[in-house]
Amino acid sequence: MTSKFARFTTALAFILSLAAMAQTSSAAANPAPSNAPAAAPADTPSATSATGVTRIGIINMQQAILASNEGRRDFEALSKKFEPKQTELKGQNDEVDNLKKQLNTQGDKLNEGARANLVKTIEDKQKSLQRSYEDAQSDFQTQQNEILNRVGSKMMDVLDKYAKQNGYALVLDVSNQNSPVLWAGASTDLTKAIVDQYNTVSGVPAPPASSKPATGMTRPSGAKPAPKSPAAGTAPKQ
């Protein structure tokens, strides 16, 4: 029974391969009729390139936002806005560090009550530092996301027009670490092209060459990492 079934499947596969070859030969011998629809004009948005091949591109949307003149300007302004808070956190952190050093060097010389009070002071100031850092980090992330969404929404319009004009059927965002893209050739990366196009449309001049890159909140050594907002650091979803 098994042998008959094996012979049957082999024969079926052979027949199917012959049918496929016949269809290929027929298609080659019978070109499309002359009344077939004409190709779209060059200026008509299309999902294929001039060669008729479907075009697929990738873009690092977050990188594009940060690299644009408007994004750089606004993130540098945000970093500067939080500099006083960063200085305040550093002062709190230094105070905690000094108290810890005092406990380490003088702890065995203090009576039980004085040592307990010093330990309690350190704990209270440590908690205050942690709360201050988490509040500042949350505020920074909120304003950072506002910039990402505002600039990103306008950049999506630029990307939409660019993709249609250049015949792209699909553009994938590789900003997220969970992006399904495992590999892509350099020619598929539209990031720089979209940044250049966006800078032209926005009209925002490039920041001075001497300007410092935008930086986020620096975590004090005495504070634990703040819980990260799910939306923080992500490109806008359309």
Image: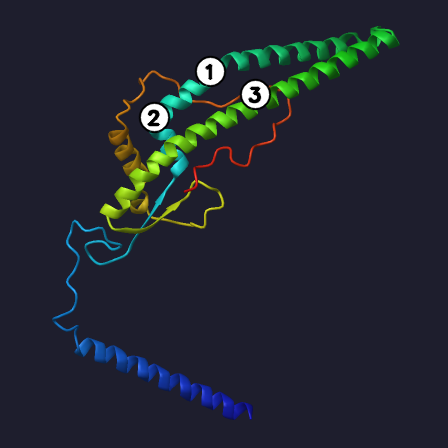
Q: Mark 1 belongs to which amino acid?
A: Lys
Residue beneath disc 1: 81
What residue sits 78% from the left and 10% below the top?
118
Above or below, 58 relative to 206: below
Say which element carries label 3: helix
In the image: residue 128, left or right of residue 204: right
Q: Mark 2 belongs to which amino acid?
A: Glu
Q: Mark 3 belongs to which amino acid?
A: Ala
Q: Tell me the tag on residue 197.
A: none
Identify the residue at the far left of this view: 34
Q: Please state, as top left, top right, bottom left or bottom right, where the N terminus lies in the image.
A: bottom right
Would you identify the image quadrant in which residue 88 lies?
Answer: top right
Answer with mark 2 or mark 3, whichever residue precedes in sequence. 2
Q: Residue 198: give x, y in percent of width and height.
A: 29, 33
Q: CB of mark 2 within 8 Å of CB of mark 3?
A: no
Say which element carries label 2: helix
In the image: residue 98, left or right of residue 186: right
Q: CA–CA distance between discs 1 and 3?
A: 11 Å
Q: CA–CA distance between discs 2 and 3?
A: 24 Å
Q: Residue 171: give x, y in percent of width and height.
A: 35, 48
Residue 147 vs residue 8, the one in the foreground: 147
Residue beneath disc 3: 136
Say which element carries label 1: helix
Q: Tell me the tag on residue 70.
A: 2
Q: CA–CA distance between discs 2 and 1?
A: 16 Å
How would you rate the neighbour count of disc 2 (Cα within 10 Å): few for under 14, some for 14-19, many for 20 or more? Answer: many
Tell me if residue 127 can be seen: yes
What residue sits 67% from the left and 17% below the top?
128
Answer with mark 2 or mark 1, whichever residue precedes in sequence. 2
